[in-house]
Image (spheres, rainbow, N blue to C red):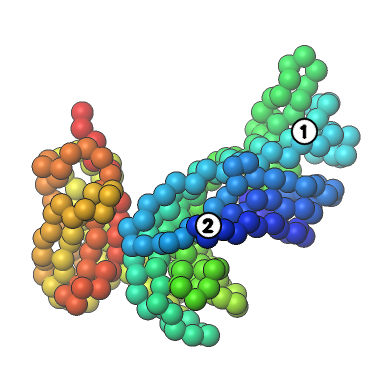
């Protein structure tokens, strides 16, 4: 949930940086000021960070205000006592790659953290007798140009040991094969259509697994990689290697792999080239009937 015209507050410790709240303009361009506190707070960075780290972050924000400050045209006929915006976030983070990043203002050794964020933003009204009522759909899914409802966003954050903030953030569209939407560098912002023009991370879409979840067999699709020998290593969620296979790949390739020997649960499939550089890592969930 992006809100302009605000003053943001962070909390820093030896193990994490947290986003605890903000003061300033209310979301949805509603025309008034708020003091908002995340409970629980949003984790912006953890330390120490290592390859294959996996974590889940939950955060939430409630902003309550009197209905009298909202124009009647935005209330769709409602006459509530109060209104609140209810924002919830569930974010899954996976450190899935490492290497050297070359950007316009330097070269950095980085870890890449993939952040998949599932959000749900509701606008609720408090009615006499009824109490709090979810009015998101009745208000047309938004107010003042804001977007409410459920959403999924995917970002790649690149961290180094030289800065607390990310060296770069790549936002992708999960509905369009993770096509790149924007790239933000430290400290400049650039919007591009082809990530390969600037970042040496052409591997963003090089590995995909389907079906996911899988039962007995998984298709491993490898695309847009140079012809050569590659290793596929499978790790459990604790980072322990449980399977390793080698392939010669020439052009876009789909490999069918039997996973009946693996127990149900989450696994990480990591593709590396003959030099040992990790091209990409994907998570696979295995289920059993």
Q: Position of residue 232 (x, y in %)?
A: 17, 61
Which of marks 1 and 2 precedes in the sequence?
2
Instruction: Work out whether residue 197 can be spotted.
Output: no
- Residue at numbered disc 2: 16
Q: Nearer the viewer, residue 261 or 45?
A: 45
Q: Residue at x 81, y 37 (%)?
A: 65
Q: Residues within 10 Å of mark 1 (few under 14, many from 20)?
A: many
- Looking at the rendering, in which quadrant would you find the C terminus? top left
Q: Position of residue 21 (x, y in %)?
A: 69, 50
Mark 2 and mark 1 in contact? Answer it, CB < 8 Å.
Answer: no
In this view of the protein, which residue sits in the foreground, 19 or 252?
19
Mark pair 2, 1: CA separation = 33 Å
Give above or below for 236 relative to 194.
Answer: above
Find numbered disc 1 in the image and state the secondary structure of the residue it sits on: strand
Question: Residue 130: x, y in percent?
Answer: 73, 16
- Front residue of this view, candidates 272 and 240: 240
* Residue at screen point 88% across, 39% down: 69
At 45% from the left and 68% from the top, the residue drawn is 158
- Give the labeled residue for mark 1: 83
> Which element carries disc 2, helix, strand or loop?
strand
Picture mark count: 2
Circle 2 residues within 10 Å: few <14, some 14–19, many ≥20: some
Say left or right for 146 vs 173. Answer: right
User: Could one spot residue 64 in this view of the protein?
Assistant: yes
């Amino acid at each position: 949930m992006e809100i302009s015209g605000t003053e943001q507050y962070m909390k820093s410790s030896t193990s994490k940086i947290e986003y605890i709240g903000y003061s300033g303009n209310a979301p949805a361009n509603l025309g008034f000021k708020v003091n908002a506190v995340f409970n629980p707070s949003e984790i912006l960075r953890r330390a120490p960070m290592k390859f294959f780290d996996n974590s889940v972050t939950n955060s939430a924000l409630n902003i309550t205000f009197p209905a009298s400050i909202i124009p009647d045209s935005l209330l769709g006929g409602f006459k509530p006592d109060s209104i609140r915006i209810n924002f919830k976030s569930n974010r899954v983070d996976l450190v899935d790659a490492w290497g050297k990043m070359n950007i316009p203002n330097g070269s950095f050794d980085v870890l890449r953290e993939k952040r998949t964020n599932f959000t749900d933003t509701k606008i609720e009204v408090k009615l006499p007798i009824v109490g709090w009522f979810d009015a998101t759909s009745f208000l047309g899914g938004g107010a003042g140009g804001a977007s409410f409802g459920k959403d999924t966003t995917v970002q790649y954050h690149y961290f180094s040991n030289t800065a607390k903030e990310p060296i770069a953030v790549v936002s992708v569209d999960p509905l369009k094969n993770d096509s790149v939407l924007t790239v933000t560098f430290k400290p400049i912002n650039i919007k591009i259509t082809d990530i390969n023009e600037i970042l040496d991370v052409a591997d963003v879409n090089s590995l995909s697994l389907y079906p996911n979840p899988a039962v007995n067999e998984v298709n491993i699709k490898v695309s847009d990689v140079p012809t050569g020998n590659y290793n596929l290593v499978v790790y459990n969620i604790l980072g322990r290697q449980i399977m390793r296979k080698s392939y010669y790949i020439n052009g876009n390739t789909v490999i069918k792999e039997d996973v009946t020997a693996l127990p149900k649960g989450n696994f990480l499939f990591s593709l590396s080239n003959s030099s040992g550089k990790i091209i990409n890592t994907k998570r696979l969930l295995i289920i059993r009937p």
